[in-house]
Structures are given as C-alpha cells and as structure tokens.
C-alpha cells in the first residue's frame, strides 16, 4: 500500500482536489479536512462512472478534447481529465459534445495537455458530508473508496473555501 496526500486549490465558490489513479489502483481516503464560509456547504466525494479515451492531442490552453463522447454525455457533466504520461488529473466541466466530430468541449481551458491514450472520466457524486460555515474533519480506516480510476473531492463556498488535506492510500 502506498500513501498519498493532496491539498485543494483555495477557492471562492469551489475548491477541489483530484486524486490521480491509473490502471487498477484502488483509492482509500482515510482523512479529509475542508473549510467553507457557506452555511449549507458540502464536502462531495466523486467517483468515475464512465470513461472515454483521448484520440488526438489536445493542448492545455484549449477547451476542445479529442475524444468520442461517453454514453449519455451532456452539458454540465463533471469530468476528470487524466494524463497517463504525467499521472495527473484535472477537473473539467462539459459545455457541449459533438459526437460526429468525436470531441468534447469544456467550459474552460483543459489545464492539462492530453495525448492519445489519456482518459476522460465522467464523475458522479458517491458520498457527501455537511461542512457548513466551518472546518470539518473526517477520519476512519476508510472514509471513501474509488475502486478504479481517479477520485475527485470538492467543497463549495460563497467567498472562501478550501480542501485543506485529503490523505489515504492506494491499495
């Protein structure tokens, strides 16, 4: 088992962190800490439910990802773009899909250069914990598990929020 720890970006409306995992890595989150200024904020744990494979290079500074749409692709879907070469992932949101052209257009630049063979994962909420306008910590032998693929953890806010730390192990 290999340990990991990640922090999220400091955000106003959203802070998130991607826990990268390629192949058959299993992610076990054992600790999470988040802070928000929003009374009804939630710490949301997302796991992949579908994926598609990148077919042609896409630059980090563009919104178009060259990949066939996964089944049921729609505007507003939350994705993790995963680079097999760097072993990193980034959060993205779908703006539109062009099934005929084999492209997915994002609401903002990809933030990660993609190459053929990289993956695009549709993420779905698998669990959530109320945070409120406070700092919330959760720990247990297993708080959240992703059996295959990357994990995504988010907290929302009104003017200030942050994923302080997420820690666990790959098994």
Image (cartoon, rainbow, N blue to C red):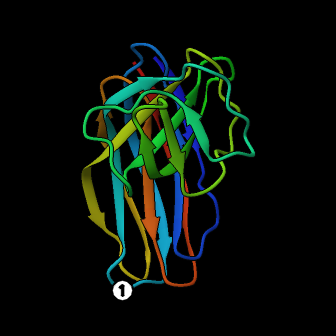
The residue drawn where x is 53% and y is 46% is 105
Q: Is residue 90 left or right of residue 109?
A: left
User: If the image is split into quadrants, where does the N terminus sit?
Assistant: top left
How many marks overall? 1
Q: Circle 1: is it few (<14), some (14-19), or many (20+) Cα within 10 Å? A: few
Q: Is residue 149 left or right of residue 12?
A: left
The residue drawn where x is 25% and y is 40% is 72
The residue drawn where x is 37% and y is 22% is 26
Q: In which image quadrant can residue 107 be found?
A: bottom right
Residue 44 placement (x, y as % from top left): 34, 57
The extreme front residue here reads: 100
Q: Is residue 78 left or right of residue 66?
A: left
Residue 116 placement (x, y as % from top left): 60, 16
Q: Can you say whether 80 is above or below 87 in the image?
A: below
Residue 155 placement (x, y as % from top left): 44, 65
Residue 43 placement (x, y as % from top left): 37, 62
Is residue 20 or residue 144 the one in the foreground?
A: 20
Is residue 140 or residue 67 the one in the foreground?
A: 67
**Residue at which label 1 appears:** 39
The residue drawn where x is 35% and y is 72% is 131
User: If the image is split into quadrants, where does the C terminus sit?
Assistant: top left
Report if residue 152 is visible in the image: no
Is residue 154 or residue 144 the one in the foreground?
A: 154
Report if residue 36 is visible in the image: yes
Q: Can you say whether 54 is above or below 38 in the image?
A: above
Q: Secondary structure at mark 1?
A: loop
């Amino acid at each position: 088992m290999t340990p990991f720890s990640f922090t999220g970006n400091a955000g106003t409306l959203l802070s998130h962190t991607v826990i990268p995992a390629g192949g058959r890595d299993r992610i076990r989150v054992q600790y999470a800490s988040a802070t928000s200024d929003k009374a009804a904020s939630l710490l949301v744990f997302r796991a992949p439910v579908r994926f598609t494979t990148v077919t042609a290079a896409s630059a980090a500074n563009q919104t178009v990802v060259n990949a066939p749409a996964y089944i049921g692709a729609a505007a507003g879907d939350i994705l993790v773009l995963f680079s097999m070469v760097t072993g990193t992932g980034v959060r993205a949101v779908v703006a539109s899909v062009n099934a005929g052209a084999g492209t997915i257009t994002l609401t903002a630049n990809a933030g990660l250069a993609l190459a053929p063979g990289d993956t695009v994962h549709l993420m779905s909420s698998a669990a959530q914990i109320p945070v409120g306008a406070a700092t919330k910590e959760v720990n247990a032998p297993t708080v959240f598990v992703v059996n295959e693929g990357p994990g995504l953890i988010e907290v929302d806010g009104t003017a200030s929020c942050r994923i302080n730390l997420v820690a666990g192990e790959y098994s």
